[in-house]
Amino acid sequence: MQLYIGNQNYSSWSLRAWLIFAQHDLNPDIIKLSLFSDSFYQTLQPVSPTAKVPLLIDGETTVWDSLAILEYINEAYLNHFCWPKDRQQRATARAIANEMHSGFMAIRNEMPMNCRASRKVSLSEEARKDIARIEQIWGQQMSQYPNQWLFGEWSIADAMFAPIALRFATYQIPLSKAATQYQKTVLNSPAIKQWLAQALEETEIVEEDEAGEPINQP
C-alpha cells in the first residue's frame, strides 16, 4: 500500500489522509513529493487521474481524494471504527466532515497551511465568517465531549478539521474557550506532533503558501 503526499509543511489535504494511518498504526509506504515541481507531476500523472495528492494505491485500488481515502481505509481495514457508533452522532460527524471538505474557501485562500511559520494576515469578512462557523462547530462538540475529540473518540471528522487547528496556530487566531479546548486536543496529539516534526525537517519554500507577513518571535 502506497500513500503519496506533498510537502508536510504545506499540504493540508495530505495531512487529512495521512492521519488515519498514524492514528491506527497502519504503515503504508509514504512517497513524499515536492509540490508544484516537475517531478511531482511526472510521478503522479501515470498513476492518478488528477495528478494531485494525496493518492492511495492499495493493490488494484486507487483512491485520489482525502475524504475518499479516509472512508476506504475505515471500511477496508478498521471495521468502520472511525465514525461514531451512534447513528445520530454519525450523521452529524459526516455532515461537518463534508462541510469542511467542500466549504470554508475563504480560510483556504487566505490562510494556507504553513506549519513552520508564525504569520499575520488581514482577513476578509468571509474568512471571519468561516472562523465563526468553525468555532461554533467545535464549541458545540466540546459542550458534549469536553477536552476530547469532536465525538469523544477520534473520528474522520477530526482528520478533516486537523489542518484548521494548525492554521489557527500559525496565524494566531483568537478562539473561544471551547474552541481552544479542541485545538489543544489536536495540537497535543502524538500523530500531529509526529507530522509537525517531519514538517520542520523540510527546507523547501512554496511561495504560493507563504501568505501574510512573519510575526517576529522573541
Image (spheres, grey):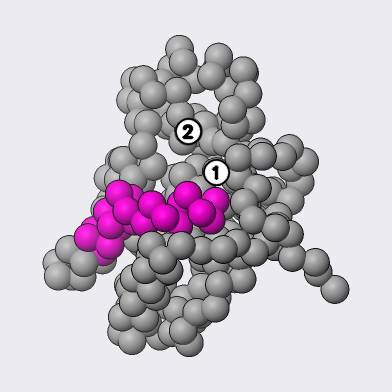
Q: Main secondary structure of the magenta part?
A: helix
Query: Depth check: 138 or 122 in front?
Result: 122
Q: Residues within 10 Å of mark 2 (few under 14, many from 20)?
A: many
Picture quarter with the C terminus? bottom right
Q: Residues within 10 Å of mark 1 (few under 14, many from 20)?
A: many
Q: Mark 1: which secondary structure?
A: loop
Looking at the image, is mark 1 or mark 2 earlier in the sequence?
1
Q: Residue furthest left?
A: 87
Q: Which residues are magenta?
A: 93-112
Q: Residue 102 magenta-drawn?
A: yes
Q: Residue 26 magenta-drawn?
A: no
Coordinates of residue 57 in the picture (x, y in percent)? 42, 27
Q: Residue at x 38, y 62 (%)?
A: 126
Q: Check disc 2 and give the amino acid type.
A: Val
Q: Which residue is mark 2?
A: 53
Asked whether the viewer can see residue 194, the reply is no
Q: Mark 2: which secondary structure?
A: loop
Coordinates of residue 127 in the picture (x, y in percent)? 43, 62
Query: Depth check: 29 or 62 in front?
Result: 62
Q: Check disc 1 and give the amino acid type.
A: Ser
Coordinates of residue 113 in the picture (x, y in percent)? 56, 52
Residues at circles 1 and 2 in contact by the CB criterion of under 8 Å: yes
Q: Which mark is residue 11?
A: 1
Q: Residue at x 31, y 80 (%)?
A: 140
117 w.r.t. 142: above or below: above
